[in-house]
Amino acid sequence: MVYTYKSIKKADAETKRLFSKIYKYFMTDYDYIKTNAFFDTHPLDYLNDLIKESDLFYKVFKGDVFLGCIYVNNLNIHSCEFNAFANRKLGADTYKAGACLVKHLFSTYNIEKVKAIIDKDNRPARFSLIKAGFKYECALKKETKRNGELIDRCVYSIFRGE
């Protein structure tokens, strides 16, 4: 099955629904979201800001099925940061699509490295990244706050030619 990518500049209803479900899973309530450093505003406003501020932002489809979104930040001379959010039931497919996008990044841009930073306990993302060829690089101790606790994050990366 072929994955297709649709570049978007503003969140549509489908993207908003998925983003809201995902953040309801991670964030217990709106008061927490308001106090989290990442969210100064409502999560859907944050989503639109994320789309505007990302270097590349794609909706990903497998056939007609919307899998999730993949976006790239900090695209510079030698590297970029890869991120995704997906329907939990279809998440593995989103990262497979991400692997295709990583190949595209290497062939289109003169970068040497693509990295992903994930929560230490995010097993589905870790598994998907490893399956896509990413390798564990390092841990960022107490990097972010989740539900009032500082948590570790992990950096995974893939280099050109791997």
Image: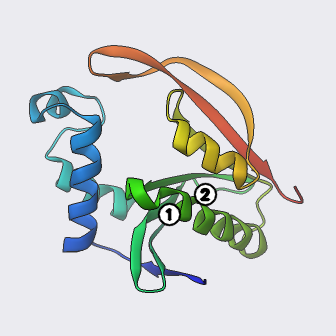
Q: Is residue 117 above or below residue 91?
A: above
Labels 1 and 2: the sequence-earlier one: 1
Residue 106 horizontal side relative to residue 46, left or right = right
Amino acid on which disc 2 is placed: Leu
Residue 110 horizontal side relative to residue 61, left or right = right
In the rendering, at what x and y percent does residue 11 appear? 26, 69
Q: CA distance from mark 1 to mark 2?
A: 6 Å
Farthest front residue in view: 89
Q: Is residue 1 above or below residue 67?
A: below
Write down the residue under mark 1: 55
Q: Secondary structure at mark 2?
A: loop
Which quarter of the rendered picture does the C terminus lie within?
Answer: bottom right
**Dot 2, crowdedness within 10 Å: few (<14), some or many (≥20)?**
some
Q: Is residue 138 above or below residue 112?
A: above
Farthest right residue in view: 161
Q: Nearer the viewer, residue 156 or 53?
A: 156
**Dot 1, crowdedness within 10 Å: few (<14), some or many (≥20)?**
some
Q: Nearer the viewer, residue 120 or 39?
A: 120
Amino acid on which disc 1 is placed: Asp
Q: Residue at x 29, y 29 (%)?
A: 37
Q: Are marks 1 and 2 in contact (CB under 8 Å)?
A: yes
Q: Residue at x 76, y 67 (%)?
A: 106
Q: Residue at x 54, y 36 (%)?
A: 123
Which mark identifies residue 75? 2
In the rendering, at what x and y percent does residue 102 appear? 68, 64
In the rendering, at what x and y percent does residue 8 appear? 37, 76
Q: Is residue 94 above or below residue 14?
A: above
Q: Nearer the viewer, residue 20 or 89?
A: 89
Q: Residue at x 76, y 60 (%)?
A: 111
Quadrant in the rendering for residue 87: bottom left
Q: How many marks?
A: 2
